[in-house]
Image: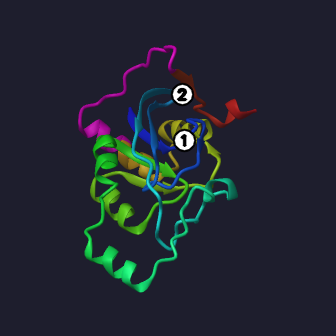
Amino acid sequence: MIKVAFASNDRVNVNLHFGAADTLVVYDVSPGYAELLGVGEFVKVNMKGENRFKALSDEQSADVIDMQLSAEELERLAAKPPEDKVIAKLDFLDGCSAIYAASIGTSSIKRLIMAGIQPIIVGTGQTIEDLLNEVSLALHCGGLSWVERAKARAERAALAPAVPHESAGGLRLITSIEELE
């Protein structure tokens, strides 16, 4: 019914910064069911901003280059137009309702919202399956405003929810609190 993406390098946990993510995982989520639609792989990006360590574990922060630049180097970099690492990701996320990531920069948040994609920052290591269950439950019972908006958009676009066929790539998800017991 709705497509949801996750910034994850292991396809199990949300553990990447959106801008630097080299892997995005996309699922189609319906009440009680999720199916893997695709995995996008991108060029690994070294983060340079002041928030480059935000929401990263100690192990992951070792992959970030701590740039101590001289005044001349900073001036040279400022004169050079920045590489836009987000364009390819926005293209890949076309049609998605939301992206979960360990961190998302301010400019990327604005661009995601303009593209109609809800940016959601979660703690590093939050499992994709738990988040899929949360979305599934919200599709069935309500409770998450962005899911309600995405569901309404899907219904307006005549994407009526079809009964999903369980396949090798799908996950059975919860649709009620009682199923948690």
Please tell me which residue lies in front, 161 or 92: 92
* Mark pair 2, 1: CA separation: 25 Å
Q: In the rendered view of the protein, which quadrant contains the C terminus? A: top right
**Disc 1 on helix, strand or loop?**
loop
Could you say which disc has been placed on residue 110 in the image?
A: none
Horizontal side of residue 28 vs 12, given as left or right: left
| Numbered circle sitting on residue 32 | 2
Label 1 amino acid?
Asn
Give, as a single range, the part of the protein colored magenta.
151-169
Side of 117 where 134 appears, left or right:
right
Q: Is residue 33 above or below residue 75?
A: above
Q: Nearer the viewer, mark 2 or mark 1?
A: 1
| Image spot of residue 154 (x, y percent) | 31, 38
Relative to 79, say whether 29 is above or below.
Answer: above
10 Å neighbourhood of mark 1: few (<14), some, or many (≥20)?
some
**Residue pictured at 55% horizontal, 35% vertical:** 11
Answer whether labels 2 and 1 touch (C-beta < 8 Å).
Answer: no
Q: Position of residue 151 (x, y in %)?
A: 37, 41
Question: Which badge, 2 or 1, is on the more N-terminal residue?
Answer: 1
Provide residue 29's location: percent of width, then percent of height: 45, 32
Taking the spot 65% from the left edge, 48% from the top edge, the residue there is: 125
39 part of magenta stretch: no
Question: Which quadrant, please, contains the N terminus?
Answer: top left
Query: Is residue 167 in the magenta section?
Result: yes
Name the residue beneath numbered marker 1.
9
